[in-house]
Structures are given as structure tokens and as C-alpha cells.
């Protein structure tokens, strides 16, 4: 819940639809968002060029995935890591967590099966964070590995140091996009 609340802008910034948010990730990563129509892509490019403040970008991107947190038995963690796609935090200079936590993306259609199979228990303070998306997961898988997704994930972290790293990275990406 804290991650979600942190990703909310104090104003009335409307979140982009899931496929549009993933389109923004693609464009910021220098890729083509070919699932969007030409007009929608053009408008999204204009919107991204007009955004100068990370606090305006992050809330718009919040619907790219639904964040679910769980507790899991430590024996389930290696199996879970094999089922998810993890953002590339090393591209931001952040080393992978070794504290027994798991954070990654999962296709929405797989969530219930994974929860039952691994005995995950919903827990707002849990060490397992699954970012669940209904977007075409083959495309999402490619975009999750970009520094853009890593920066977005870091910018919504509950850890202030991670948020700072994510915000700085997003600022650089926005500046480079213009």
C-alpha cells in the first residue's frame, strides 16, 4: 500500500491506461510502441516531451502493473524467482537484494496459479512483491529489463535511497527524451 500511495501525485494526475504506460516505457527506452496507433503514439511522445518533473511522470505510470505483496516460505523463493521477470536494477547501480526478498513482474493470468502453487499469503508488509500486468507479457518481459522500468520501480520504493536513485534516473531519461 505504501508503494501505491507514494506513486500517487498530490494533484489529480490521471494515470495512463496499462498499454499506454507500457508504450511510454518503450518510448523512453528508445523502442517503438507498435501496439499503439500512430495518433496515440504521437500524443504520447508529445506528453513525454512536455513532462519535466518526475513527480508528473510516476503517477501516470502507476497502472502499468498492479502491485501485490505476499509472504512466502523461504523454500518457495527460488521457484518464484524462476517464474518472474526482474527489473534490471544493476543498470541503475543497485545490487540485487540478498535479504530474502523477491520483486518482479508476473502475467496477470498466472497470479492465482503461482499463489496456490507456492503457498503465498497476502501480506502488505511481505517480502515478496509481484507486479502483475495484463499487458502482452512477451512485450512486457522485454520492457521490464530496460533501465526505464528499473527506475520506475525504484522511484516507487518505500526505501528513500531507492526512490532518490529512481527519481534521478527518470529525470535523466526524461531530459534525454526531449
Image (cartoon, grey):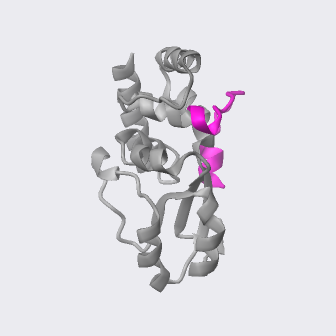
Q: Position of residue 161 (x, y in %)?
A: 41, 49
| Mark count | 0
Q: Residue 139 in the image: x percent, y percent? A: 46, 44
Q: Residue at x 29, y 58 (%)?
A: 95
- Quarter of the image holding residue 131? bottom right
Residue 19 versus residue 88 in the image, above or below: above
- Asked if residue 94 can be seen in this view, the reply is yes
Picture coordinates of residue 66 (x, y %)?
Answer: 63, 51
What's the residue at 39%, 15% (across, down)?
Answer: 178
Task: Name the residue: 54% across, 29% down.
Answer: 57
On screen, residue 14 above or below 122: above
Task: Judge whether residue 160 can be spotted in this image.
Answer: no
Q: Is 65 on the left or on the right of 31, as rendered? A: right
Q: Is residue 63 magenta?
A: no
Residue shown at 51%/51% (left/top)? 137
Q: Could you tell me which quadrant the N terminus lies in?
A: bottom right
- Towards the viewer: 138 or 26: 138
Vertical relation: 41 (above or below) 98: above
Q: Residue furthest right?
A: 12
Judging depth in this view, the residue of 108 and 165 nearest the camera is 108
Q: Nearer the viewer, residue 8 or 140?
A: 140
Based on the picture, tell me whether residue 9 belongs to the magenta stretch.
yes
Residue 135 to residue 117: above or below: above
Segment colored magenta: 1-20
Residue 138 at what x, y percent from top left? 46, 49
Q: Is residue 114 left or right of residue 83?
A: right
Amino acid at each position: 500500500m505504501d508503494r501505491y500511495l507514494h506513486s500517487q501525485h498530490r494533484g489529480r494526475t490521471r494515470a495512463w491506461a496499462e498499454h499506454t504506460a507500457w508504450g511510454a516505457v518503450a518510448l523512453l527506452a528508445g523502442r517503438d510502441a507498435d501496439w499503439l496507433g500512430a495518433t496515440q503514439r504521437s500524443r504520447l511522445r508529445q506528453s513525454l516531451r512536455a513532462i519535466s518533473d518526475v513527480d508528473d511522470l510516476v503517477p501516470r505510470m502507476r497502472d502499468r502493473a498492479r502491485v501485490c505483496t505476499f509472504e512466502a516460505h523461504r523454500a518457495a523463493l527460488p521457484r518464484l524467482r524462476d517464474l518472474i521477470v526482474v527489473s534490471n536494477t544493476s543498470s541503475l547501480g543497485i545490487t540485487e537484494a540478498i535479504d530474502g526478498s523477491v520483486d518482479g513482474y508476473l502475467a496477470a493470468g498466472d497470479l492465482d496459479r503461482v499463489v496456490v502453487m507456492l503457498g503465498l499469503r497476502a501480506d502488505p508488509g511481505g517480502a515478496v512483491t509481484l507486479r502483475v500486468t495484463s499487458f502482452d507479457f512477451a512485450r512486457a518481459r522485454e520492457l521490464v529489463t530496460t533501465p526505464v522500468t528499473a527506475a520506475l520501480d525504484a522511484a516507487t520504493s518505500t526505501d528513500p535511497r531507492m526512490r532518490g536513485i529512481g527519481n534521478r534516473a527518470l529525470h535523466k531519461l526524461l531530459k534525454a527524451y526531449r
